Image (cartoon, rainbow, N blue to C red):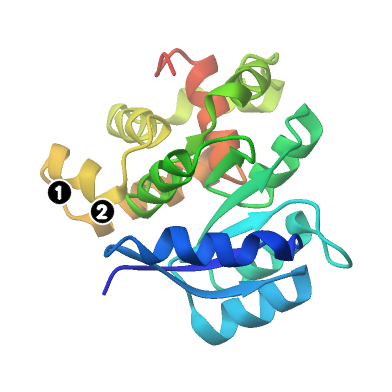
């Protein structure tokens, strides 16, 4: 069975078009389409899709809050933000809510497919047009507590941190370092705790500031 997708967009005129485009693929399928955040949260629980493509601006419960609710209950689901908004505040809010990707609505269908393939593989995807938004956030001045904590990481933890920040999945890192994925998950949890980091974005920011990756 291919990748199961829950598509969330309040522009119902596009729904049939979306169904048609995905029907042409054998590796992905639309499980359901939702028009608002409340329905998205409910359907995510009922269907457990692999990926939720989430419009950011939705009536009632917006896409950012819906993403947060879905991932609080079903952390294995991957969410991709989909929006015509490319401002710093919106993009960062969606990523901080837990989204693994962000695609602008003006992008071609092929880019959405690329994003889905990336997040399913454990990586992060951002439309090229909004990369600058994240770069500005990544090079922001380091927080004093984060800098002070860096010295307590072991060489192996710094290596794991670098690979995680570069978008490798736990399995890919485990294969590269010849250890088990469970060991990598343990390292990752310990790194987050030592540095007081809350999410993937904070982790990447720290790795960039410390020169562990040239993202």
Residue under numbered circle 1 = 179
| Location of residue 157 with respect to 43 vertically, above or below | above
| Location of residue 74 with respect to 21 vertically, above or below | below
Percent coordinates x, y for residue 84 in the rendering: 73, 38
Q: Which mark is residue 158?
A: none
**Kind of element beneath mark 1:** loop
Residue at 53% x, 42% y: name it. 200
Please identify the quadrant where the N terminus is shown: bottom left
Percent coordinates x, y for residue 177 in the rendering: 15, 38
Please identify the quadrant where the C terminus is shown: top left
For label 2, the crowd category at 10 Å Cα-Cα, with few meaning under 14, some 14 to 19 and many 20 or more, is few
Seen from the viewer's position, the closer of residues 200 and 41 is: 41
Label 2 vs label 1: CA separation?
7 Å
Percent coordinates x, y for residue 107 in the rendering: 56, 35
**Kind of element beneath mark 2:** helix
Q: Is residue 161 left or right of residue 41?
A: left
Seen from the viewer's position, the closer of residues 126 and 199 is: 126
Residue under numbered circle 2 = 183
Residue at 69% x, 46% y: name it. 94
Label 1 near label 2: C-beta < 8 Å?
A: yes
Residue at 61% x, 81% y: name it. 43
């Amino acid at each position: 069975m291919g990748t199961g997708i829950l598509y969330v967009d309040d522009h119902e005129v596009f729904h049939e078009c979306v169904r048609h485009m995905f029907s042409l693929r054998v590796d992905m399928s639309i499980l359901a389409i939702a028009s608002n955040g409340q329905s998205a949260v409910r359907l995510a629980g009922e269907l457990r899709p692999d990926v939720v493509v989430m419009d950011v601006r939705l009536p009632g419960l917006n896409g950012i809050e819906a993403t947060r609710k879905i991932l609080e209950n079903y952390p294995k689901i991957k969410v991709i933000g989909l929006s015509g908004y490319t401002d710093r505040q919106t993009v960062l809010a969606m990523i901080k809510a837990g989204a693994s990707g962000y695609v602008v609505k003006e992008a071609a269908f092929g880019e959405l497919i690329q994003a889905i393939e990336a997040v399913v593989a454990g990586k992060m995807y951002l439309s090229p047009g909004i990369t600058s938004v994240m770069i500005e956030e990544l090079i922001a001045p380091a927080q004093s507590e984060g800098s002070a904590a860096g010295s307590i990481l072991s060489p192996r933890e710094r290596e794991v941190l670098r690979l995680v920040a570069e978008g490798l999945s736990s399995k890919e890192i485990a294969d590269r370092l010849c250890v088990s994925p469970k060991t990598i998950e343990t390292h990752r949890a310990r790194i987050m705790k030592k540095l007081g980091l809350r999410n993937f974005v904070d982790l990447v920011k720290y790795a960039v500031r410390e020169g562990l990756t040239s993202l």
